[in-house]
Amino acid sequence: MTSEQSDILKHKHVLITGGAGFIGSNLCEHLLSYDIKITCLDNFSTGKRKNIEAFKDNPNFNLIEGDIRNLSDCKKASANVDYVLHQAALGSVPRSIADPITTNDVNVSGFLNMLVAAKEVDVKRFIYAASSSTYGDSKSLPKVENQIGKPLSPYAITKYVNELYADIFHTTYGLNTIGLRYFNVFGRRQDPDGAYAAVIPKFVQQLMNHESPVINGDGSYSRDFTYIDNVIQININALTTTNTQALNTIYNVAFGERTTLLELTSLLKTYLSEYDSSIQNIEIKHQKNRVGDIPHSLASIDKAKELLNYNPEYDIKSGLQEAVRWYWNHLR
């Protein structure tokens, strides 16, 4: 964070929904390091108490255990707040296919509750986690914000509806919003456990346990993997930008390069082998592709660079090295 950004946020109060989650807890940590007042709203359905354990005695940190599906919880958390970083959501394409109702309740009804609560206290800015899944069946690469396809999962639908609601709340109520379409974010505190764990922490844990990671398909599918510190940077830029033209729109949040799953596993084995040389010899297995998965994902980040001064510092290699170091120290 620059000194100018720190001055803008000085004496301000930021609500982070989903603040005990992977991205949310990293945002909490970063803002608290600059003595900024934080309220964390989380129901711990996917967030972890251990992610915010280090903050509990910080006088600038306030935890509200609540659910965005309850409007009263949203209003309580939004009281006296200047900015909202809305990270709370029920992620995972497969989970949304297995249980579309709960995904919709959290991601659509919960999102609407937060917009209403933010509007009522007249927050300065509402920054929310959008998703690259919104691009759906669009085959164009790289992905450009104003060209989307047909959604391929209930999760993708919910995240697109968020964008529509945010736009309506600006045009109808004057609420300033910014949507950040995250592309495959990874890094410290990302959960490796559970049926819907993201690919990088899941593969890291399996390799550390000398188990064979299983790739869906032949490994040629590719993603624009995005390290957590890049995501923190653009959230801070979105909070503090003085460019009014940057408000009330959507941005891709990525590095702007794509990596196949085969390349990913090769890099993971290489970096983990620095700690345990036998990992290099672990076999990679394959199974059929998952329903709802898009083959390739690559973002254009030109818009974010131009309007939000986004300058991602971590590519896939440097980000993976940081993530592997963290997992090696925290998962064993």
Image (cartoon, helix red, strand yellow):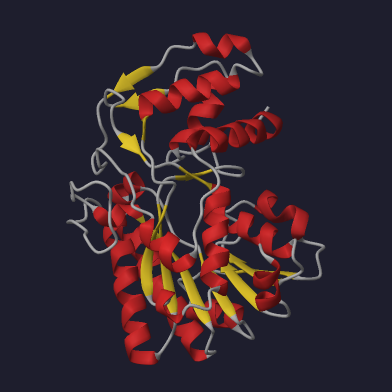
Q: Between 208 and 275, which is closer to the camera in this rendering?
A: 275
- Up the image or down, 39 lies above or below 27; here it is below
Q: Between 266 and 257, which is closer to the camera in this rendering?
A: 257
- Up the image or down, 120 lies above or below 187; here it is below
Q: Quadrant of the N terminus?
A: bottom right
Q: Residue 196: x and y, percent?
A: 42, 41
Q: Residue at x 52, y 89 (%)?
A: 122
Q: Residue 151: x and y, percent?
A: 21, 55
Residue located farthest toward the front when viewing the structure as drawn: 306
Q: Residue at x 21, y 60 (%)?
A: 147
Residue 161 placement, left or right of 318: left
Q: How many marks?
A: 0
Q: Is residue 40 visible?
A: yes
Q: Between 230 and 244, which is closer to the camera in this rendering?
A: 244
Q: Quadrant of residue 10?
A: bottom right
Q: Quadrant of the C terminus?
A: top right
Q: Residue 282: x and y, percent?
A: 49, 12
Q: Residue at x 24, y 46 (%)?
A: 141
Q: Quadrant of residue 319?
A: top right
Q: Residue at x 44, y 60 (%)?
A: 305
Q: Residue 15: x and y, percent?
A: 60, 73
Residue 128 placement, left or right of 222: right
Q: Is residue 22 visible?
A: no
